[in-house]
Image (cartoon, rainbow, N blue to C red):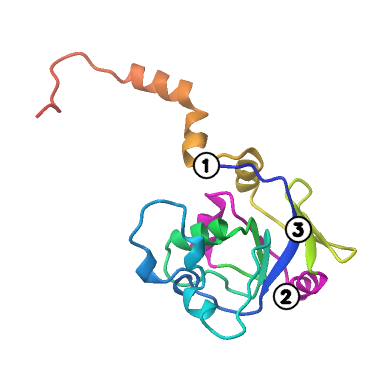
Amino acid sequence: MEHVIRIHGQVSVLDRDDVDTDQIMPKQFLKRVERTGFGEFLFYDWAKQDGWDLPRHPILVTGRNFGCGSSREHAPWGLQDYGFRTIIASSFADIFFSNCTKIGLLPVALDESACKAIAAAGEAEVDLEDLVVRAGGQEYPFELDAEIRHRLLNGLDDIAMTLQSAVEIEVYENERERSGPVTTAL
């Protein structure tokens, strides 16, 4: 997983509340197990509508309760594959928020007025080290759990976090070895 320190760039705006994971990544595209290639199906039904335009910028600003609905991991995969590196919204569904952080996609919760100001600015910098979004000459501080922040700053997914304890795991496994017959063999 790539580490996240600062994300700077243009802002894409999806001015909608209560966007659920089926709207982000429709069910007919969930048959694959790879994490890549989902970007082309992002917002599939909406993308067919006249006037739909969602540029591939690194920052997405959207409405409240983003990622509600089912817990499908494919929704964050699709957003990341499309090119988004961070999503700014006034609120997120809990499981969606967690799924984003596990793949290095940074969800940032700010109040609605800050989201609107960042969207209007058109360009922003999300600074995970300083826990602030800078846009339009303003700074918008945000909060993030210290462990999640550590994981993102250091590019650590679940496997990498576990491997950091490899020595302790090996010691534990060696200490619990028992002599005698193997009772688990078939």
Residue 13 relative to residue 132: left or right:
left
Q: Label 2, on which residue?
A: 112
How far apart marks 1 and 2 lie (CA) works out to 30 Å
Residue 14 in which image quadrant: bottom right
Q: Secondary structure at mark 3?
A: strand
Tell me the amino acid under the disc marked 1.
Answer: Asp
* Residue at x 79%, y 64% (from the top left corner): 123
Q: Nearer the viewer, mark 2 or mark 3?
A: 3
Q: Residues within 10 Å of mark 2 (few under 14, many from 20)?
A: some
Q: Assess whether residue 109 is covered by the magenta stretch.
A: yes
How far apart marks 2 and 3 lie (CA) works out to 20 Å
Badge number at residue 9: 3
Residue 166 relative to residue 30: left or right:
right
The quadrant of the rendering that contains the N terminus is top right
Please state the horizontal and vertical placement of residue 112, each as a whole percent of the image. Answer: 72, 75
Precedes in sequence: disc 3 or disc 1: 3
Please state the horizontal and vertical placement of residue 118, each as a whole percent of the image. Answer: 78, 69
Q: Secondary structure at mark 1?
A: loop
